[in-house]
Image (tube, helix red, strand yellow):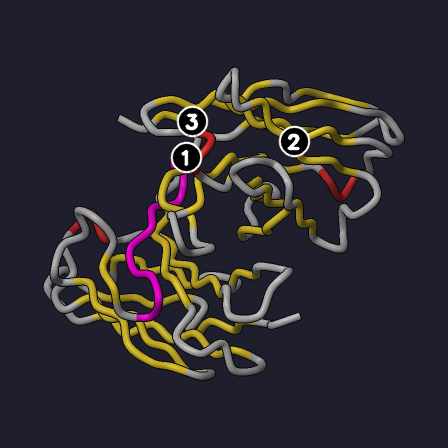
């Protein structure tokens, strides 16, 4: 099973700052990694798939990069609505499909 | 507009059974794989099961294999999860998710239905 480790667990930033979130896989998943955003009481929303492709309707301030075992989600300039929990998920070696433990981006 | 609406959750005793449903609309249901993902209260996301568009392929997390069964009725645009031998650790919100065509990521999600396993 591919274990995804996200860091940091919590990121405290101010609106307008850049956010950089990390997801590390226990073995290579190629480029088969996605990022989701989840706000309290809401379902997750797909942001990025296959490491760097923005999903439909996702603003350009969200970008993804990486391959193999190391991946990054960047938010170029945080908007108030971006404060949420972010999860990565891999499909490179499944079943099972696996998620990371999440990174909470909170307002500093 | 894609809509996924789960139902069937509730309180059940350990060892009991429950069947969840997910009513889908706004897309060609039979052409898309579907999945169940769960989220324990205050915790992260855990993939549970996935079924191919025509239902011929089914996949499970080890934690539910042999106890849960995923199925679908394409004539009713409905996804199911039959859960047997429930345990306290199965307590979670169960979310239905549409698989992004050609990938095994999830592009649409329902709001979920809460399953509580407790005596």
On the question of residue B38 being in view, the answer is no
Residue labelled with disc 2 = B71
| Residue situated in front as seen by the camera: A99 or B102 | B102
Badge number at residue B4 = 3
The residue closer to the viewer here, B74 or B93, is B74
**Residue A70, position as x, y percentages in the image:** 42, 82
Label 2: chain letter: B
A44 is within the stretch colored magenta: yes
Q: Residues within 10 Å of mark 1 (few under 14, many from 20)?
A: few
Q: Which dot marks residue A41?
A: 1
Within 10 angstroms of label 3, few (less than 14), some, or many (20 or more) residues? many
Instruction: Give SS at disc 2.
Output: strand
Q: Nearer the viewer, mark 2 or mark 1?
A: 2
- Residue B43 as seen in the image, left or right of residue A33: right
Point out the stretch of residues depicted in magenta.
Answer: A41-51
Q: CA distance from mark 2 to mark 3?
A: 16 Å
B45 magenta-colored:
no
């Amino acid at each position: 099973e591919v274990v995804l480790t996200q860091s940091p667990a919590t990121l405290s930033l101010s609106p307008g700052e850049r956010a950089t979130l990390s997801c590390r896989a226990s073995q290579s998943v190629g480029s088969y990694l996605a990022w989701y955003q989840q706000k309290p009481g809401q379902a997750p929303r797909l942001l990025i798939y296959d490491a760097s492709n923005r999903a439909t309707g996702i603003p350009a301030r969200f970008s993804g990069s990486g391959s193999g075992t190391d991946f990054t989600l960047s938010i170029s300039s945080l908007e108030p609505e971006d404060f949420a929990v972010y999860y990565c998920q891999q499909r490179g070696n499944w079943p099972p499909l696996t998620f990371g433990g999440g990174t909470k981006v909170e307002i500093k | 507009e894609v809509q996924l609406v789960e139902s069937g959750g509730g309180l059940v005793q350990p060892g009991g059974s429950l069947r969840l449903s997910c009513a889908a609309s706004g897309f060609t249901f039979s052409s898309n794989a579907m999945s169940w993902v769960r989220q324990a209260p205050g915790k992260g996301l855990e993939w549970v099961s996935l079924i191919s568009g025509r239902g011929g392929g089914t996949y499970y997390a080890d934690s539910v294999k042999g106890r849960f069964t995923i199925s679908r009725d394409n004539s009713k645009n409905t996804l199911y999860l039959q859960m047997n031998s429930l345990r306290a650790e199965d307590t979670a919100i169960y979310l239905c998710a549409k698989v992004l065509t050609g990938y095994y990521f999830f592009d649409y999600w329902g709001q979920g239905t809460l399953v509580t396993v407790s005596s």
